[in-house]
Image (tube, rainbow, N blue to C red):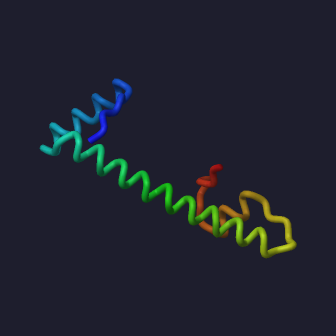
Amino acid sequence: MRPLNLPQDIEQNLAFLARETGREKDDLVQEAIVRGIEDLMEDLKDIRDAKKILASSSRQWTLEEVEAELDLEGRIWG
């Protein structure tokens, strides 16, 4: 695995989780990255869906309406 320079608090949490779960820190980091990427991919899909809705409508939508329509709960970024 590629070395990471993590903030001290994250490193401490990672060491704690490794001790508590009996898992290797590298495995925990890999799982966190996979979960994070999956979440970001889902967010990207939601954003693309929102853009399609906006592009296909002459109606003006507020951010709150788009978030509510797509059940995003304030997750739109970029």
Position of 45 relative to 6 (above/below): below
- Compared across the picture, whether 57 is left or right of 48 comes to right
Position of 1 relative to 13 (above/below): below
Position of 41 relative to 22 (above/below): below
Task: In the displayed orientation, state which residue is furthest to the bottom.
Answer: 56
Residue 42 screen position, x and y as percent? 51, 62
- The residue that appears at 66% across and 69% down in the rendered structure is 69
Residue 56 screen position, x and y as percent? 78, 75
Toward the viewer: 63 or 47?
47
Toward the viewer: 7 or 4?
4
Task: In the displayed orientation, state which residue is furthest to the top.
Answer: 8
Position of 22 relative to 69 (above/below): above
Q: How many numbered marks appear?
A: 0
Residue 16 screen position, x and y as percent? 22, 34
- The residue that appears at 38% across and 26% down in the rendered structure is 7
Residue 25 screen position, x and y as percent? 22, 39
- The residue that appears at 64% across and 65% down in the rendered structure is 48
Image quadrant holding the N terminus, namely top left
Toward the viewer: 67 or 15?
15
- Compared across the picture, whether 31 is left or right of 76 comes to left
Task: In the displayed orientation, state which residue is furthest to the left.
Answer: 22
Quarter location, residue 59: bottom right
- Compared across the picture, whether 19 is left or right of 42 comes to left
Quarter location, residue 15: top left
